[in-house]
Amino acid sequence: LKIEEMREFPKIKSVPLLVDRIRISSEKKGRICDSLSLCYEMAEGFVNIFEVEKQKWHPFSLHFSCSKDKLEFPEIAPHFFSFNNPYGACPDCHGFGNHLKIDEDLIVPNPTLSLKDGAIDPFTKPSHRILHRKMLDFAQRHKIKTNVPYQNLTNKQKKLLFNGDGIFKGLAGFFERLERKKYKLAVRVFLSRYKNAVLCPTCHGRRLRNETQWVHISKKSIADVLSMTIEDASTFFIGITLAQVQQKLVSDVISQIRNRLDFLLEVGLDYLELSRLSRSLSGGEYQRIQLARQLGSKLTETTYILDEPTIGLHPSDVGNLVTIMKRIRDGGNTLLVVEHEKIVMEAADNILELGPGSGHLGGEIVYSGPLQNMHNTLTASYLRNPNKIPIPKKRRTAHQFLKLNGVSHHNLHNFDVEIPLQSLVCISGVSGSGKTSLIQDTLYRTLAKIFHFTPGNIGKFKTISGHTHLDDVSLLDQRPLSQSQRSNPMTYLKAYDEIRVLFSQTLDARRLSLSPKHFSFNVSGGRCENCHGRGLQVIDMQFLEDMELVCESCHGKKFKSEILDVQYKGKNIDDVLEMTVSEALYFFSHSLPLLRKLSILRDVGLDYLKLGQHISTLSGGEAQRLKIAAELSAKKKNSILYILDEPTTGLHFHDITKLLYVLNRLIDQGHSVLVIEHNLDVLKCADYIIDLGPGGGKHGGRLVACGTPEQIALCEDSLTGKYLKSVITDT
């Protein structure tokens, strides 16, 4: 080679070696391959081919790098496309898609407070009071007013508070110092209170390393595919175009992907994005994903146990769910379903009803057999009599309204909505139609910010009005009430204090100089110190799960023997805690404060609970009704908006009757009730319905119809109205 030709090699660091000169022809294919193999071997995977006719060099490489700019590309393997693997995860956010950053809204939760009154929340803690004084001195040095609301300070003054000076390091310096001490658990917990998730600037929430964006199938990267809904992904993989060689390699894989997507479509999850976080799924959505998984596994002779699989399902989707369960059954499997949905019960081969009541009044098999032979049971009475839950004779007419304008959070299509106050209002629509986005993410968080300065991201909207008619907002969901093993219905309703006072006033208690605190299992004095008032002792089993044993000292009664010797009307404190609400109503009939709170528990259908029953043992529906009982018993503000999300989950028809009673009691007291619901018995009893849809995901997010149940039933565009019409007609 001439020196001039050698200079044309791109970035040559060594002397090129001419291996072969070949005139291209089919007969010389073997020679060409041998020459190339020799080149790759000698040049560590690089080769340059010079085309004589065009006088042009063609560089090739066996490495994942660009032959022109030498940009290196990592080795492509399945885990390269996984954000759960360090090799494929974004190196900045480690596959989480966001970073936890200090949030000013969390540091200053109430901007109406002044610096002097504690606007800077971390400086109000006892361990940081000295910093509060230093901050006030800093503010005076820089002429920042400390007696005006924080929200009235200028942006320059706020920035100064965060950056500080040579004497006071500011809020930024304070949190930087804490970051260096994150090895301490207490510091990590403290920091978590003031951090919020911020989108990762490197991967923009995709969670994958950026190199994955360079690998395309049908012009789509894996991040593009993961951002699709299940419906869109199904369309994409059906219409995918590949070369013949590629098709042979991946045909089986694509077939499996299509089958799995079809199963997810069958269970009514077409609106979910493939990248949706599992923790954001409702209980019903999670169960339906499990059903789709079982359809794909094609197991036989397996028993499946499903607990309320219709959670979050619109009546139009329940039929599809029943079809899927029948397919699993027909595959040689058995399904045991805990369910109250009428459509599911009618499709069952066998019904097993427990009862006849709740708690100690239940626990018996009332009926076992086909539905058509079931008579004289509580469930049968509701199934055979649609009027058992009657339609109200008169709908309430609202005079005050809460209005949201320009709601456009997630899939909501920039609409205005008007919510009547002092009424029972239901939000309906198929799964994914935007109910949670409208009510919880936007309305509730906005009102919580207004009334409680609660921090957090609020759904996108333009304006809100009518909130001045309200004094407060409360979300009554089915989340657990307390993680403490000590809490019980009486402590939650703050009724246990009155029981302790009654015991402290007995002659035996006075003789022993016992005060109300001696009858508490939460503090020292009268509780058993061996188990600290739990009634149980926890045995550390090292690498196994901890074991709980009944306390040997108090035998599970939580109190010292001398406290148990004190009796009130022939019962000691342990006997009282073992009573049901029904029994306690009779026992404390002379105590008006106790009678009032116990009566509320009876009214919400919790009369079977024991007074000392651990709160952690309550179901989601029981927990929600206990929250409602607490609201009814407390002397609160005049006008509160109560928001409930699927309150009928886990409830029998008889429980729904009681739920409607207590909700109407709240309204009669001057409050407003807003319910996200699919249950037709609740919808038909509403004063006003706001129906979203018409579908889920991108097919939803629109205001389909608003009005009374009768008006919704007449709306041809409303899927809810179609099913509501049959219920109203039957009734």
Image (cartoon, grey):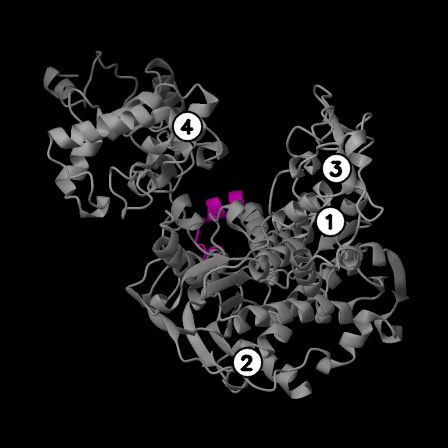
- Of circles 2 and 1, the one toward us is 1
Q: Position of residue 491 (x, y in %)?
A: 64, 46
Towards the viewer: 503 or 488 = 503
Which residues fall within the magenta stretch?
Answer: 235-250
Mark 4 → mark 3, Cα distance in angstroms: 79 Å
Q: Label 2, label 1: how many angstroms apart (C-alpha)?
A: 43 Å
Q: Which of disc 1 and disc 2 is earlier in sequence?
A: 1
Residue marked by disc 1: 611
At horizontal 76% and vertical 68% (from top left) the residue drawn is: 345
Residue to which mark 2 is pinned: 721
Residue 78 visible: yes
414 to the left or right of 611: left
**Would you place residue 125 above or below residue 151 in this image?**
above
Can you give x and y, in whole percent of width and height, for residue 150 in the image? 23, 44
- The crowding category of the residue bearing disc 3, from other C-alpha atoms within 10 Å (few below 14, some 14 to 19, many at least 20), is many
Residue at mark 4 to residue at mark 1: CA–CA distance: 64 Å
Q: Nearer the viewer, residue 554 or 250?
A: 554
Dots 2, 4 in contact, CB < 8 A: no
- Give the mark toward the camera: 4 or 3: 3
The mark nearer the N terminus, 2 or 4, is: 4
- Which callout, 3 or 1, points at the residue further toward the start of the chain? 3
Looking at the rendered structure, the kind of residue marked 4 is Glu
> Which residue is labeled 3 in the image?
509
The residue carrying mark 4 is 75
